[in-house]
Amino acid sequence: MLAVAALVTMAACADDGVVPSELVDLVTGGGGTGPATAVVLDNPAAMEELTAAFALTADLAEDVQAAVRAAEIPDGSVLLGGVASRSCGIPTDAEVRRTGSGLVLTGTGFGEVPEECAGLFVTVALVTVDADAVD
């Protein structure tokens, strides 16, 4: 149930602004799809919903789960997770943007992308944001 995953929706807000965030981890692997909005990872069920919703490969899902378990979340913050990139390049950072449909994670800081791409990399970003950003 996606309600358990606490999908972050900000339907009343359509300003496409950058939300201050701190990168916790970027986990990259092959395969995976997912919803357009970030998921608040505030309980074990939300983590399970994230990996199921994104249809991640088993190895990528395990790596994301390990990164979430290791995350240190400052007081007053929440952990967000989501696919930040599906491309031949691998981002070195991620940003959170507020859109009309919710908070969206986007990969940034891509290095040189090979001319020929044999397959897409999927990068899941884990970031912390102020808890007020998701109210």
Image: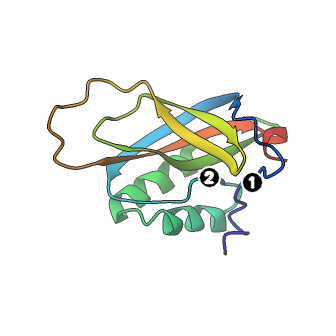
Q: Seen in the image, is 107 located left or right of residue 119? A: right
Residue 38: give x, y in percent of width and height. Answer: 62, 50
Q: Which of the numbered marks, if any, corresponds to residue 37?
A: 2
Residue 56: give x, y in percent of width and height. Answer: 40, 62
Residue 115: give x, y in percent of width and height. Answer: 16, 32
Q: Amino acid at mark 1?
A: Thr
Give the residue at x 65% y 68%. Answer: 45
Residue 67: give x, y in percent of width and height. Answer: 50, 47
Q: Amino acid at mark 2?
A: Thr
Q: Nearer the viewer, residue 74 or 104?
A: 104
Q: Residues within 10 Å of mark 1 (few under 14, many from 20)?
A: some
The vertical placement of 87 against 55, above or below, is above
Q: Which of the numbered marks, if any, corresponds to residue 9?
A: 1
Outermost residue to the bottom: 1
Q: Secondary structure at mark 1?
A: loop
Tell me whether the residue at label 2 lies in contact with that at label 1, contact meaning CB atoms closer than 8 angstroms.
yes
Give the residue at x 68% y 64%. Answer: 5
- Residue 3: name its quadrant: bottom right
Q: Earlier in the sequence, mark 2 or mark 1?
A: 1
Q: Nearer the viewer, residue 42 or 18?
A: 18
- Residue 133: name its quadrant: top right
